[in-house]
Image: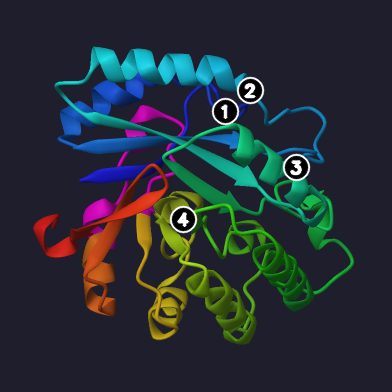
């Protein structure tokens, strides 16, 4: 099995050394993991800086690969936090660096972070969701140097109330954009840890992605501590099978490698 969304102490919101996570992955019998450290340029909360030394990150990964070469595959990834005014800057990053895997996530909308709740003030839950998805649609229309969209419906995690709107119309536009460019989405299993009924995205959105023709799908725990590695993977794989997905993808040098789900469950 594979976990393709993992953070270590290279991410500003994580204190877990890579070694801890790697050792736990080996104990769990994982064949491959991918570290996907946070880079969120211009993050609106100035108390935290989601940037790190990329050269040091590369050196550390090479060290870990050499140390654990006979036990597990370790891939080099990144999770970028897109905002409309940052797309050129992220393109420059991708031109200057090399990764096996790039997650494109949106953690802020209208230059406001979702975490603090400021984004939700003075608007209805439907207005907040609509604004979030519209900005995500703008980003995927104007930026393509990524491999999967991360936790597509992340906004649900921070909403104080549920919306009765499924927003499938605008999600269809988003999926049509990325599928036509050969991009995929992830199933981020951390949703249940944060009180949601499922991972992100929810089953209805995964169904919609499949109906739109989506086939590239990674799975990741979004783990910031080793104890949540591969969280709810068995249940998640069964759900994907029930929807009709046959494969999950890992990546090498930004190219997807497909694995039959039936062999992983």
Dot placed on the residue nearer the N-terminal end, 3 or 2: 2
Q: What stretch is highlighted in magenta?
A: 219-236
Task: Work out which residue is located at the far front of the displayed protein and give it.
Answer: 95
Marks 3 and 2 close (CB-CB < 8 Å): no
Is residue 110 within the magenta segment? no
Disc number lying in front (4 or 3): 3
For disc 2, the marked residue is 52
Determine whether label 2 and label 1 are within 8 Å by CB: yes
| Contact? badges 1 and 3 (CB < 8 Å) | no
| Tag 1 secondary structure | loop
* Image vertical order of residue 124 relative to residue 33, above or below: below
Residue pointed to by mark 1: 11
Point out which mark residue 149 bears: none
In this view, the mark in front (3 or 2)? 3
Mark whose residue sits in front, 4 or 1: 1
Name the mark nearer the viewer: 2 or 1.
Answer: 2
Q: In the rendered view, does 131 fall on the left or right side of 256?
A: right
Q: Give me the C-alpha separation between circle 2 and circle 1.
A: 7 Å
Instruction: Please give the residue where the numbered disc 3 appears in the rendered image.
Output: 89
């Amino acid at each position: 099995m594979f976990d393709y969304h993992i953070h270590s102490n290279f991410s500003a919101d994580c204190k877990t050394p890579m070694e801890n996570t790697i050792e736990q992955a080996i104990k769990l019998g994982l064949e491959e993991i991918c570290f996907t450290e946070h880079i969120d340029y211009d993050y609106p909360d100035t108390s935290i800086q989601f940037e790190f030394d990329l050269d040091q990150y590369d050196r550390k990964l090479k060290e870990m690969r050499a140390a654990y070469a006979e036990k597990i595959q370790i891939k080099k990834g990144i999770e970028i936090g897109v905002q409309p005014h940052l797309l050129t800057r992220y393109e420059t990053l991708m031109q200057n660096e090399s990764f096996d895997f790039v997650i494109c996530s949106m953690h802020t909308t209208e230059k406001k972070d979702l975490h603090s709740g400021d984004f939700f003030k003075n608007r209805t839950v439907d207005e907040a969701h609509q604004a979030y998805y519209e900005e995500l649609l703008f980003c995927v229309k104007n930026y393509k140097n990524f491999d999967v969209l991360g936790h597509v419906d992340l906004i649900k995690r921070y909403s104080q109330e549920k919306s009765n709107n499924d927003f499938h119309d605008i999600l269809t536009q988003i999926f049509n954009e990325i599928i036509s460019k050969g991009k995929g989405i992830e199933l981020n299993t951390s949703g249940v840890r944060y009180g949601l009924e499922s991972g992100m995205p929810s089953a209805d959105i995964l169904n919609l992605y499949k109906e739109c023709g989506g086939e590239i799908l990674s799975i990741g725990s979004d783990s910031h501590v080793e104890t949540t590695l591969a969280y709810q993977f068995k249940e998640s794989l069964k759900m994907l099978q029930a929807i009709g997905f046959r494969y999950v993808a890992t990546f090498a040098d930004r190219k997807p490698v497909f694995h039959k789900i039936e062999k992983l469950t």
